[in-house]
Image (cartoon, helix red, strand yellow):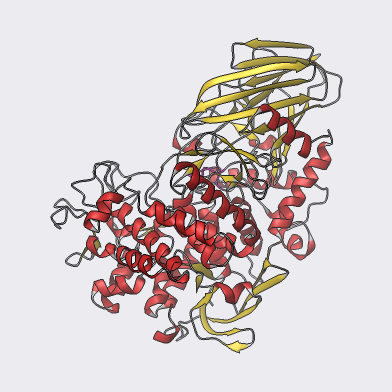
Amino acid sequence: MKRRILTTMIVLVTIVMGAWAEGSSSNAAAIRGGRLTKLVNPYIGTGGHGHVFLGANVPFGLVQLGPTQHTHGWDWCSGYHYSDSILLGFSHMHLSGTGVGDLGDITVLPATCPEEREVKFSHLAERVRPGYYAVTLSNGVHVELTATERAGLHRYTWPADVDSGYVMLNLKYGVGWDRLTEGKAVRTSSKSITGHRFSRGWADSQRVYYVADFSEPMASFRNEGDTLVVMSFKNTGQPLLLRVGISAVSEEGARANLTAELNHWDFARTMKEADDKWERQLEKVSIGSASKAFSDQAAVFYTAMYHTMTAPSLFNDVNGDYRGADGKIHHDAGHNIFTTLSLWDTYRAQHPLMTLIHCDRQEDLAATMISIWKEQGKLPVWHLVGCETNCMVGNPAIPVLADIVLKGLTERREEAFEAMKASAMLDERGLALLKQYNYIPCDLFDDQETVGRGLEYTLADWCVARVAERMKKKADQRYFDHRALSYRNYFDKSTGFMRGTDSKGQFRESFNPFHSAPKNRDYTEGNAWQFTWLVPHDVHGLVALFGSEQRFTEKLDSLFIVEGDLGEEAPPDITGLVGQYAHGNEPSHHILYMYNYVGQPWKGARLIRQVLREQYRNDFDGLSGNEDVGQMSAWYVLSAMGLYQVEPAGGKYIIGTPLFDEMTMQVGQGRTFTVKAAGNSDENIYVQRARLNGKPYTRSYLMYDDIVRGGMLELDMGPEPSDFGTKKKDRP
């Protein structure tokens, strides 16, 4: 416990040290009129199983420039873990919160002798805030990093007692599974290098081209094979600057990106511009509270917002060129193209949040997914640097694209529908069996996970049906509505669980609702207790399977109480347990809000507050599971607002329990939407009454249009449950 307190104090010290302007204000003062970027604690999630990126980047940028360590296992998926004290260097691309490690491209290490290949550091010597990272290494070199969308800027200050400083450019290093297949580094002048790094890993064919310019001429340059360059520089007493532009297209593209975004050596200017970009995004939501815990809550909230904007990552060059999913170079002058699409995670909260506060990016996201469909014949599953990893199950791009269409955020409705339908009608990944049996038989599908896979397909099919309904495609609507009900074939009424079902319609004989194993399992990173509720598109249909609302709620109540052995082979993703509810992994995230559907919103409110309070902390180990590219944090942001979209598309936001007394979000076109919670406190967590734009409001949900047209939702909070939202006409 003492060690935890000490490390927490260290984190808070580094945040204070890292204030970009002198006279850093307190969190409360920052809310009143200071910089919101000062509230962000980028260390949250760098320890435990958070897997978050630490370093310098700008919102949704391609470049994530930060420290890279040796990979010691699962917790090093981002390339950095708080427990470690050795750096390999500073790399220009990282993942944030994933369960698989990759990237770590173009690693640079400043040194004081030519033999150094790694260096120690202390967290006490780190300074970090949005768009800026600094550390004084054990070799005495002071390193500062900042970034633009497609370029990184380094500033190295050598110790006064050395005559020369050294810079190692290492193309061999990558994170996790990443392995170099081809590297190139060519000195093109006394101050410049160009080249590329090709690799295989989670992304099976990654290509990164780079150009690197130094502010001073190299005193020496030596290639050690194709993977390492050792350069020396005279120590003039002034910092050495290095600017690096990257591209997935070509060296020429990298040079054009660098010229367009970073054609100067003004580090302070670039750092301030990065800070300003973050500030503009963080300003999209303002919060206020009289709570004694507000300082920590504000830090957690704005850090969560910060984490939701690491990805999707920009992927096209400044001229519109990008590397497509077919490996060819394409051009789109009208849209930005994105990568790092962790859709199985992010369709649940990250993208519904983006449709509220980043509505201006939705057309580009739609264009990205439609382009990927044209290039690879299906919508993305888990897309990384132009490569389809096929990681995770279902058709997770369909809810995202359907949501964009149904909310009127794209003009490309016909293409979007065609892409969704084509992806849903493929024969791969169990879809052929689904079309034949109306479920995926566990004895005929070698990859197993048939329940998790099948349930994800049903909710995606429901999304296709809703778009077909909107576009008056009646035959398609009927077909996909039928498939959207296939979840019924996995439900065992005798046990009240979703179970693996064989080709004869019999449930798998061996069954333990607690167990989860990597082989011969029916669920995806979970167990029967968690996956039985994965019917967010038809909650009332799921209730009917239980036979009554009473039986449904009794089972749902049990989820948060029952305990059992997950089994020796359970994956590490099943974390953040409240009973068998697993908040540390995404399939559980909607469950707390299902109580609204059966007229008992107070039960969800109590649990939501518990999760907000216990599983998100202003601490390096402040996340109960890995961040999953913004999803964990997006759940927090939406839930703190008192809103959550359960149904995977269409914009029905369930009213929960706001964490703050007042919250205002910018919803586009100069409009704002405010949630006020009168009497809000740690005890007054239950909604008593509501008013929407001054008029009494009795429903326990809001529609997307209610929010984005602007206005105010006023909630009167109290210490006891009320009848708000309990009548059937007021339920979602």
> Can residue 520 be seen in the rendering of this structure?
yes
Type of secondary structure dominating the magenta stretch: loop
Q: What residue is drawn where x is 76% and y is 10%?
A: 220
Q: Quarter of the image holding residue 34?
A: bottom right
> Can residue 514 be seen in the rendering of this structure?
no
Residue 187 sits above or below residue 429 on the image: above
Task: Give the magenta-colored segment's residue range.
Answer: 45-52
Q: What residue is drawn where x is 45% and y is 63%?
A: 648
Residue 159 sits above or below residue 458 on the image: above
Q: Is residue 576 left or right of residue 490?
A: right
Number of marks in the rendered image = 0
Residue 43 sits above or below residue 202 on the image: below
Residue 307 coordinates in the image, percent (x, y): 60, 51
Q: Is residue 23 left or right of residue 553?
A: right
Q: Quarter of the image holding residue 255?
A: top right
Residue 69 in the magenta stretch? The answer is: no
For the residue pair 263 and 331, the one nearer the viewer reads as 331
Residue 45 coordinates in the image, percent (x, y): 55, 47
For the C terminus, the image quarter is bottom left
For the residue pair 379 and 161, the one nearer the viewer reads as 379
Q: Is residue 377 left or right of residue 217?
A: left
Residue 506 coordinates in the image, percent (x, y): 14, 57
Q: What residue is drawn where x is 64% and y is 43%?
A: 10
